[in-house]
Image (cartoon, coloured by chain):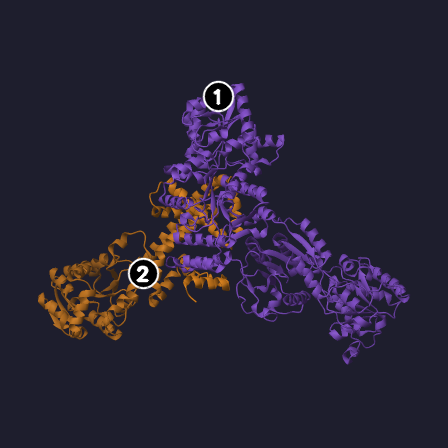
Chain colours: A orange, B purple
Amino acid sequence: MSHKSFYRAFEDKFRGSRALIKNRIKIYLPFILKLKELYPDSSALDIGCGRGEWLELLKDNGISAQGIDLDSGMLDACLELGLDVIQDNGIQYLKEQNDNSIAIVSAFHVVEHISFDDLQVLVEESLRVLKPGGILILETPNPENIKVATEKFYLDPTHIKSIPSELLSFISEFHGFIRTKVVKLNEPKELVNQNCASLMDVLGGTSPDYAVVAQKEADSDILKHFDNVFSQDFGISLVSLAAKFERRLLNVEAKTAETEAKANVAEAKANVAEAKANVAEAKANAAEAKANVAEAKANATEAKANAAEVEMSHILQSRSWRFTKPLRWFGLQVRLIGALGFRARFKSFLVKVIRFFISGAIRFVSTRPKLKAVIWSLIKRSSRLELFTRKFHLDNSSKHEICNATFLTERGKRILNDIKGEK
Amino acid sequence: MKILIDLQSCQSPSHMRGIGRYSLDLALEMITIGSGKHDFHILLNSSLSETILSLRAQFEPLVGRRNIHIFGGVTGVSGIENNIELTQCAEIIREFHIKLIDPDFVHISSFFEGLDNNSVTNIPERGSIPTAVTLYDLIPLINESDYLESPLLKAWYYRKIEQFKRADLFFSISESAKKECLEYLNIDEKKVFNISSSVSNAFLNIDITETESNNILDNLNIIGKYVLYTANLDTRKNITGLFKAYSLVDKEIRDTLKLVIVSHIDEERRLIIEAEAAKAGLHQGELILTGHVSNKELIVLYKRCSLFVFPSLHEGFGLPCLEAMVCGAAVVGSNTTSIPEVIGLEDAMFNPLDPVEMAALIEKALVDNEYYELLLNNSKQRVKMFSWTTTAKKVLERMESFTVSEKLEVSKESKYKQCIDSISDKISKLSKSELKKIANCIDLSMPKERPELLIDITALAESDAKTGIQRVVKSIIEKWFDLSLSHQIRLVYLASDGHYYYAFDYESKYANNQNRDKGYVLPTSGDVFIGLDLVAHAASVTGEIYKKWREFGVFICIVVYDILPIRMPEFFHSGIKDAFPLWGSMIIERADKLLCISESVANDLEEFISSSAVERLLPYTIEHFHLGADFTTPKNVVTESVATELEGLDLSKTFLMVGTIEPRKGHEQVVNAFETLFASRKDYTLLIVGKEGWNTECLVKKLKSHNANTSNVRWLSNCSDDTLQYLYHNCCALIAASYGEGFGLPLIEAAQQNIPVIARDIPVFREVAGDYAYYFDNDNRVDVIATTIRNWLELYEKDEHPKSDNMPWLTWEESSEQLLRCLNIN
């Protein structure tokens, strides 16, 4: 399989369908259309044009555009669509262009493929060839997204280095662009309006791509036209997602407190009834507490509990034993509430529920060392979350198995062998 | 006839209910009237341990410890756990244990046990020992819709029914229960006998004064006259029917009355019942639900009620009716099932489904004096018809007249093999841990070939620190291993994991331990445990172990060297001082026999027991024996080392004290006395032999300065055995000044060498030395000793002082035999 067709195939699989991409990049249209008002005959240059979605979009909007790409496999797709493309090194080609000649220079998912030196040249040269007020668009994966930073970025073997948005804006401003805008892109739309976030959202929901949109200096009347589009906000940041997650925990906590308050009232009421608890049961409980080592007692208690379940199943006229499983659980809860107080039981219930949700994510993370490191730094911001995860690990590691064989006598072991038919 | 009574019903939750009381009363009565003729044995389940000791306490005085058998009860076999294979294994183990007991008849006091607990009952399909069962009722079978709705419950009950039907004799508690058995189970009539019932002795033997009765009723909020019913809340108890009828009773009569229902009830059901009463037309406050009451309260309620009504739809016997009659109440009740057998008066019965009829009878009883007299008289007459003696006699007669086919002699080995084979068949359905559980239970169910005498040598097994107690332990076991005993001697130690293990390696010093097991110790019935070594630090652990072992039937003996840390805590450091009371309480709660090393210790212990709040269910005894002493031939050779050590001492004018320097030994008082004597009797010297012990910094400093100067007090902190022997032989007297001892070995050692003894007048020294010593008052003033020495010297110089030559003492051989006799082992 040739390299060309590999990259084309790769792009098809992982970048997304043509239609999808074309739809996504419409986000830049407000910038472009403003430029078109300014320079009705403006032209655009797209470095690393790939399958040519951007060229197509520009063409649809009446802007003549030229694409450059080294990969002929990619260019075939553009030629099929009748787009103006050249097979060449984009930076080299850029260098050959006249000063102040082009309205839009763009490079989608290019900067992560080139060296830092080339990146500087690209920015510098773009500034030179752009018309006053012209716009440079550099789109790249967003390492602020933890899933992208730790996994998705490395899907493309030709990626060199992921570039945080702060660095890319800084380079643009450093080389003389008058202003830059970080446009965060392609996040799941439903997340934007959602009030709460799951842990998985925190890990993978941040806008997976971003672009730095940089504008070349021009008269202030010209720039004024663009104030609107540059002041707009795009995408979802990691911080905002983490905040949403945090808020969710706080909500849970608030509800716990509320329920606890209610439970306290109920408990107070229950105390009256508790005082009347029958003598036998009190005695049994005392004996139980005293003899926690005695297996026999433990079993008797278990059996007693089971009897209560049967009675419960009876009351509810259940048709099959299988149905009583939730009842058994319920019976246990009732007894535990009786033994430990409602407050403690509700807390433990809540912890269980939260742990259930978190445990899946934790298992995912713990098998990926790089992600884990990133996560830890994130998690440490939320001490409560740390507590849960610690507890989770602790619980898992503290499960011992009680070995009965040590408590068999030698004769007991011989009997066991006789039963098994071993010598 | 060897009769084995399976009394698991007195262990299971049934023991709180009528069935448990019935089983207990019947068994006690059978044994009381049948002991002369029959050999009674009791079968209990090890897994239902809570009740074992109290049952042992009741039955051991009647049948002996060895006749109470504990089979290894597998856990996790209750009906609701529905683990059929494991349950079958539990049944096999019980069967195996019964076969080892080899009775002529088995009586299962309650068959339908084990639904919500680990009780195991069964009657095997083939070749079983003749088995009788008590039949209380078949209420669940006859009222399936009320009782066996759950399929699990139904399957369990039907399985029990199938096993139940295999019994050889059925003892029904009423004629009505017998009829049910014939009708619903299709049992051969010749096998079923009505043995009737009676009121529990525990119930009858309660004394209550008039004031007490008043207080009880006040506490229950019952003022004035009332009609009484006692029932659980099952539908068959017909509480709703009673409400309907009661609401039909004339309003005027009801205004002077309350309806009292005694029932175990929770708050939710109380509300339901109260709502039902209101619905039936009862007024607010007319009904009193007492909830659960004690036997005492129940008796008062019976005695004081205007009328006892028993509207139940179905009974096995109807015990509350009889209880009410015994308490002298007027009784009316249903004309169904077994109830007529109890009430026995046509005019006192109504159709429980007809409220009008019931109401009419209640009203009649309350207004018609003549009728009321009739009811009271009836109660008196009926009570005479029921007695436990009659019931127990019927049981024994039926068993005696049962034609027993000749017993086949089956060896233990083949019984074991049969048990193992049956379990092996199920092995594929059992988990590893279940198999272990089973092996453990078989192990427990099988008495050893030869019972074991388990000797605790914990400290010795760890390391031989050559303490006094360890010397005793070694001396005694050495002698015992030389004897041929009914029990096999096994040395055991408490390991750090809190379990006893055989001290296999240590044993090999004394005996060839081929064919002896190593490892974990699980004693069985007939074994004897003796706590020969002192394991005071682990009382909470050993207490639990001894409890368990006692449940199994192991005889627990503890040797008590002294309880000085309890009696004289000021002489001990906190480690011992704090641990000892716990140990003391543990042993008096757990030991069958407390073996003290002297009568004085036994007296101290007795005093401690009477001041302690510990309650022991079982009887115990305190006995004492004396420690032995090694006789050493007098050594009178002055070796070089002895000579150096004793340089400058005139032994003929030297008083000897032997023992560790610690406050309890009374050194300080003696030293001070000799300091004051220095002026008048300069020629006499006090020689102290003993290592530095606890809390004596001051005294040791003083002794050191005495050693440095020319003085009449000398201290030898390190003295060879030879030197000590030499001193015992040549000193002018031994001073035993200790404030408290368990025994008094130095006194004996002095006597062996014929030197006189001057001792503090404490009971244990009197016990050991008798008239063969000179005593001074147990008083800590210095002049007491100074005067004593002066007086003694006067006598001594005239040769009129008490001589120790004939002081009696035991050899270790005699001592160990004395101890063995205390254990009832020969």
Q: Quadrant of the C terminus of chain A?
A: bottom left
Q: Quadrant of the N terminus of chain A?
A: bottom left
Looking at the picture, tell me which residue is in the foreground, B451 or A330.
Answer: B451
Mark 1 → mark 2, Cα distance in angstroms: 81 Å
Amino acid of disc 2: Leu
Looking at the picture, tell me which residue is in the foreground, B395 or B96.
Answer: B395
Label 1: few (<14), some or many (≥20) within 10 Å?
some
Q: Is residue B61 left or right of residue B417?
A: right
- SS type, badge 1: helix
- Residue B126's place in the image compared with B172, above or below, is below
Q: Which mark is residue B807?
A: none
- Residue B472's place in the image compared with B405, above or below, is below
Q: Is residue B489 left or right of residue A329?
A: right
Looking at the picture, tell me which residue is in the foreground, A188 or B789.
Answer: B789
**Residue B630 lies in what quarter of the image?**
bottom right
Amino acid of disc 1: Glu
Q: Is residue A387 in view? A: no
- Residue B424's place in the image compared with A112, above or below, is above
Residue to which mark 1 is pinned: B363
**Same chain? Circles 1 and 2:** no
Number of numbered discs on residues = 2
Q: Is residue B761 left or right of residue A377?
A: right
Label 2: few (<14), some or many (≥20) within 10 Å?
many
**Image location of residue B67, percent across then percent down:** 56, 51
Residue that protrudes farthest toward the bottom in the picture? B640
Residue to which mark 2 is pinned: A203
**Image location of residue B675, percent across then percent down:** 84, 66
Does the residue at mark 1 contact the one at mark 2 (Cβ under 8 Å)? no
Q: Is residue A122 in view? A: yes
